[in-house]
Image (spheres, grey):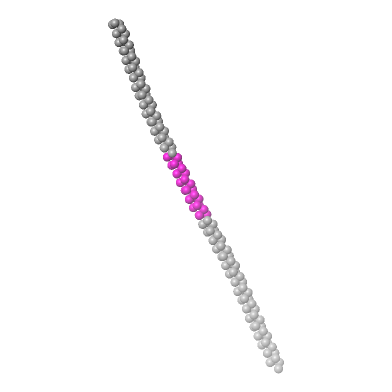
Amino acid sequence: RAEEEEAHRQEGEAKRRQAEEAQRQAEEAKRMQQEDDAARRLADAVARQQAEAAAARQRAEAEEAEEAKRRRAKEEAEAARQREEAEEAQRQAQEFARMQQEDEAARKEAEELARQHTEAKLRSEEMARRRRAAERAEEEWRGGGG
């Protein structure tokens, strides 16, 4: 009877220890699961932050590239404007030089015409003087011989 009770008690003790061990293992498993969940949440948060940082970096680089493109376009437009101004100034200078040459040619032509006019006038005056002298000589001849 005592042996039976002892065996029964030992069996109960063994079952109790087994139940405690099972409880301890369940709690350990639960604790490990919670740690895994916490680690996964942390990893997700870190990955999300890294992705956001990478996206922000890409946006900043894209904005920089866009700004550089705008600057380049502005500089090219300015260079084109300066080229056009230089070409226009060159064209005006050439036009001015051409007009000066035309003015010079017209002045020389006017001087030549004035010179020819003066020569013609002098020739005309010389002929008129000779004619008058010839008329005087003829009158003297007629008058003198009569």
Q: Quadrant of residue 33?
A: top left
Image coordinates for residue 118, horizontal then vertical, percent: 61, 76
Front-most of residues 139 and 117: 117
Residue 135 lies, with reference to residue 63, above or below; the image says below
Would residue 140 appear left or right of 1 to someone viewing this image?
A: right
Front-most of residues 113 and 90: 90
Would residue 6 appear left or right of 86 to someone viewing this image?
A: left
How many numbered discs, if any?
Answer: 0
Q: Residue at x 50, y 50 (%)?
A: 76
Image coordinates for residue 104, horizontal then vertical, percent: 58, 67
Front-most of residues 58 and 24: 24
Image coordinates for residue 74, horizontal then vertical, percent: 48, 50
Q: Quadrant of residue 5?
A: top left
Q: Residue at x 66, y 88 (%)?
A: 136
Magenta extent: 56-83
Q: Quadrant of residue 131?
A: bottom right
Residue furthest toward the right? 145
Residue 131 lies, with reference to residue 45, above or below; the image says below
Would residue 138 appear left or right of 64 to someone viewing this image?
A: right
Residue 54 lies, with reference to residue 91, above or below; the image says above
Front-most of residues 135 and 55: 55
**64 inside magenta stretch:** yes
Residue furthest toward the left? 2
**79 inside magenta stretch:** yes
